[in-house]
Each structure stands twice: as C-alpha cells, then as structure tokens.
Amino acid sequence: MAKSRKKPSKSSVDGDGVESRGKRQAKADGTECFLTTNQGLPVSDNQNSLHTSQNGPVLLEDFILREKITHFDHERIPERIVHARGTGAHGYFELTESLADYTTARVLTEVGMRTPVFARFSTVAGGAGSADTPRDVRGFAVKFYTSEGN
Amino acid sequence: MFFIQDAIKFPDLVHALKMEPDRGFPQAASAHDTFWDFISLMPESMHMVMWAMSDRTLPRSLRMMDGFGVHSFRMVNASGESTFVKFHWRAALGVQSMVWDEAVRTAGADPDFHRRDLWDAIQSGDFPEWELSVQLFTEEEAQEFPFDHLDPTKLIPEELVPLLPIGRMVLDRMPDNFFAETEQVAFCPANIVPGIDFSNDPLLQGRLFSYQDTQLLRLGSPNFHQLPINLARCPVNNNQRDGRMQMQVPTGRVNYEPNSLGGRSPKEMAAGFRTFPEAQPYSSSNSKGRIRSESFADHFSQATMFYRSQSATEQSHIVSALIFELSKVETPEIRCRVVGCLHQIDEDLAVRVSNGLGLTGVPQTLESPAGIIEYPTFCSLQLINERQRTLRGRCVGIMISDGSDALLLDTVRSEIQHAGASTRIVAPRIGETKLSNGVQIVTDGQLAGHPSVFFDAIVVLLTVEAATFLTRDASATSFVRDAYTHLKAIAVDIGGQILMDAAGCEVDESVVKLCEADADSIRQFLSAAETRLWSREPAIRSMP
C-alpha cells in the first residue's frame, strides 16, 4: 500500500531538500498527512481506477493502480517450515547475579544492567494461520540485543 | 457479487479484513474494528455484507454450497455476436448451512472438517456434483435493468433473467499430492478460451492483472504454467523463454517473430482469440479519467432486496450475526456508523441490531446518494424454504454402548443408509462394543473425539444402565445437548431418553422415540433429519 507522508513543510525537509525517512511514515497521532505513491507522488483519487470512459475498460496506463495492486500481490513472504504460528513481544533482561567468575560476557556479568530482548512463543506443527491451542511442543525463543552483539 | 466496485479498493478491503497490523489478530475473522470501520465508510459493501452475515457463509460442506462467477462475462458466437453471461454453480445436494454455534465448535473439534468431508466423500465414491447454469442477456436487455450489471456489488435476480442449466461438474478424484497439485495450482479470471470474453466490470478489469502478478511471487517464476497441475493440455507455442525453473529445452536459433529463419516457428492463427470489438460504452461521458459510473451510485437497494427476501428465521440469523460482529468492535463510533448504514437497508433490521448492541439515541445516518429502487422480494434468495429436503450426502451419528439393542441398531442403520445418508457408530470407547445379542461391533469413533457437530442428526441407543452411567460423562450429555441446540433431529430409545433428560432437552417434533424397530417412528425420524427444526430455535437461544 502506498505510504502516507506528512504535508511537506520546511521543518520536514533537510538541507538537500530531501525529506527524512521518519517524516515519510504515516502518522498514528492523527497529524494530517497525504497519500502518495511509493515514489512520493501525491494521489488525488484512491477510489477509482483509470477508465477509458464511463463504463469503459481500465487502462494499462494506470500506474497508480498497478503499483498499489502489485505491492499488495507481493505482500506475503514464505512462512517458516516449523514454528510458523507464533507471537512475540519486546522487553528486557536484568542480571541479578554476576557470572564473572565463569564468563566475560557482559550481559551475564554486569548486575543490574538491562539488556533489551525480543521473545517469540510458537507452536511447531501448524501453519501461520492455525490455532493457538493444539497439543504441540511450544517454541520459546529470546533474542538479546547486547552491547556486544545480538 | 462482492464488497467493492473497483479493484483499486481491493488492497484496502483485504487489509481491513485480515488481522490488524499492530497486534497480529484476529485470525480468519471479520469481527473486529478495522473491518467494520472500512465497511461502515464503504456503503457499496452493504449488499455483500448482508450475504456475509447470512447462513451462506457457514456452509455445512463444500459439497453443499453454490458458486458464482461474480462478474458479467461475455460470450461471442461464430457470427461474432456478443451476449453477456453470469455463471452459476448449483450444488446437486442443495445448499446446507451450519448454525453459528455449531460452526464455532466444529472449528475446535475438527479444524479440517470441510477438507476431510470432501476427501471422505470422493474416496467413498459419493462424488460431489454441481449444475452449471448461465444467465444470458444482451447489451440492450442490460440497459433495461434497474441496476448496472457491470457493478460487481449487484446480482441479477433469477426472476429477471432465468438460470439456464447447461451441464454438470462431478469431482471424482482427489489429488495424489497436496503440495504438487492443490498448493501449486494457479487460477486466473484472464484464463479464457476463444468465444469467451470479458466485460468492463472495474473489479474484473483489476483481477485480470492481479492474479498473474501475485502468482509470479507465490510460485516464484514466470514458468509456473509448466507445473503439471497448470500445464495446458493443448499445444503451447510461443517465444517466451528462459526464467527461473525453466522446464523446457527449446531448440533452434529463432525466438522472435516475425522471422524467416525458423521453419516451424509459431505463427498467428486467424481463428485465434479476438477481443470483441465493443462499440463505445453506453454512457454520457467518453473522456478518460478516474471515473465511477453514475449507474453504480445505488448502494442499498439490493441489500434491502436480499434482507427482505429472507425468511423470518434467516433475518434473525443476520441480526444475530451483526450483533455478534459489532459486539467485538471496540470503538463505539464504528458500531454506530454501521447501524447508520443498516437504517438505509431496513428500519426493522437497524432497530433490532441497535437494541442488541444496547445503543441509545438515533445513530448517525448516511445519506444514500441515489434514489432507492423498490425490488420485490424473491424466494430464490432464501435458503431455508428453498432447501431441498434430502438425506443424500449427509451423516447420522449413532451413539451406542455395551448392551445396546442390536435389532434396533441394525434396522435404523439400514434405513438411514437406504435414504442416502452415511452412518457412524460412536461409543464410549474405540474398538469393539458388545450388543444385546452378544455380537461385537467395531465402532467408528470414540465419543469424546466425535461430538455431534460432526453429524446432521443423531440416534442414541443405550441400555438404562449404560445411560445412567453416561449421564456423568460430559461428552455424552454434550453429544445430545449440542444436537438439540443445533436444531437437529434426535432419535432415542429408553436409555437415550435418560440421557436427553440429563442434558435438559425437551421432547419436540424432531425428537423421536424408538421403543421398538417400528417403521413409522423410523420414517418420522428420517423425515425430520432432512432439515433442522427451526421452530426449536427460540427455545434454545434468545432471538434478537
């Protein structure tokens, strides 16, 4: 789907006259923003495709329709062969006991340090659209974003 | 018929329908804010919404639902004359639906219910069948319709253009390999043959592009037409070459046309496909643009036609479905806006849904942009009264336990099978069960794994002793209670009656007592089993 962007203004344009990436995102806070194509072209009509005439066929020329439909058609990526059904959340890991006697890993030696994590819980057998509650082994995966690498 | 009039809205519709992008749920459900937010702002969807909220979206079996070509297509004869056509598949077994509670329970008891049903039917030689019918009409006739047939949110009432049956489809073989065939098959409305052509339906126009585009991603190569399931059964000759997963080994130096070097290189065929030379579309505007035809402006009349054509029971189901869906919508403004749209369809519908949602005050009403067309009500849009009364293709579950009456079981079973239905014997344990005459019978399923949602009607044959024991088993009482709640016919002997009493089920006209194997009782049960007892519904749930 075409991204929305904030109405161009001086404050959202950097020194080279190119909008910064963050300003191109749709605003969830209700700030007014305008629909564009992926190239940044403002779109004036998102309701009707381009017709030869009233009740006429749609034209190949309609690059806005083609871009929107093509992007939509290509949304899905292959799902995981196992653990396809899962749900995750961000959080942190806080060390309470140092293992400095055994390891140099900072994540396990700096007591009180909070390391950002992302955890994902999953089933094994079902596809991405399957139920949450089958009798199945569960996946419990945690990624640590440490200062020494993920 | 569909939700939207122009393919450019399809990504928006599907984004709104599918799980919400921040939370990743709900899966496979329209009962959430984003769907109804979009719908309430797209009144052209209202006719389809009426269908979606009706029992038609809860098919009992894939063998028991109709199919439609959605759009007007075109047929072109040998003289080059064009006729518009709407295609209809009509199930030979008739359209049968589940009730909502049954569909919800079935999803848990057997998530593969429809898939398994199709497999079982075909493997057992009970081949599903559909009649292909067409509605044929000329461009001149189309101009007399009170709606635009190019608008994919409209249907053509069969009272206006009758259905002409032209053939039948029988499905008689399951794929050998699910992935190779079912998963890799690629359908596309642009895949036609000479003599068929398209209409200017703006949804169809977009679909002609979209299917091939998405298949290029899904199957990963422009050569997906070479997969066995997609491979043309007639010669394919062209100069399209190379690409990932190329299975062909073309010979020679010529891969272009025209050429003088390739002796057998493919040439144009005069009798090949020709696009119908349509005259200028009938319209007042002939300029190019992002145009919605004025003839697409009426969004509510056919929704009204559909709703008012339903039986009282079906109207109640639509009301219940809307209340259920909207009760899952967390944003009060969206609930109000949908009820505002319902006001445009039918005042009684809007009031009943409004009451069910506990809405006070008059919800916001959207102005219909076009004059309302007064359609008559059409019985052909009903399911309940139009449903065929038949047991063909259906399944009756028979609950037994040790000591169950052998003669009664044998008689009931053969009579059910004689009526065209299959039977499955369910018992507290899998394996063998010893009947009253000492014969050991092999059961088809264990009670807890075979709830009555798997069956169209049930028979309960138990000794008093077994029945008394089973009153303490929730899977046994649920078996009876669910069948009762889902409005199914129930036949019981003395033991079965004990279980019925324990489950709190009252006797009514579709609860048949089989004290002996008397023909009248069995016939009464078979007749009741052909349909559901809709008049029982007010006794088991509140009807909004």
Image (cartoon, helix red, strand yellow):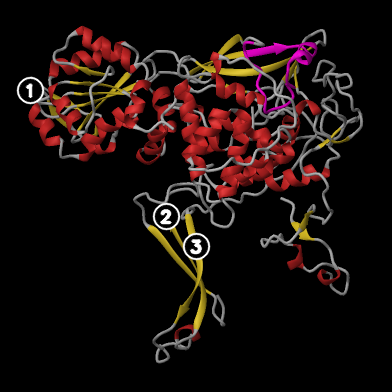
Residue where numbered disc 3 is placed: A88
Q: Position of residue B89 (x, y in %)?
A: 57, 18
Residue drawn at point x = 33 percent, y = 22 percent: B395
Q: CA distance from mark 1 to mark 3?
A: 57 Å
Where's the N terminus of chain B, which quadrant?
A: top right
SS of the residue under disc 1: loop
Secondary structure category for the residue under label 3: strand
Which residue is drawn at the image coordinates 68% and 22% (left, top)?
B234
Residue occupied by mark 1: B438
| Location of residue B488 in the rendering, given as x and y in whole percent from the top left corner | 32, 24
Q: Using the rendered view, name the quadrant where residue B4 is placed.
A: top right
Does the stretch in magenta take in B451? no
Distance from label 2 to label 1 (Cα)?
Answer: 46 Å
Residue B388 appears left or right of A51:
left
Q: Residue at x 38, y 36 (%)?
A: B106
What kind of residue is marked 2?
Thr
Q: Amino acid at mark 1?
A: Gly
- Chain containing mark 2: A
Snapshot quadrant of residue B144: top right
Q: Which amino acid, by three-letter code, is at mark 3?
A: Gly
Helix, strand or loop at mark 2? strand
Question: For the residue carrying disc 1, how many other residues have a C-alpha within 10 Å: few (<14), some (14-19), or many (20+)?
Answer: few
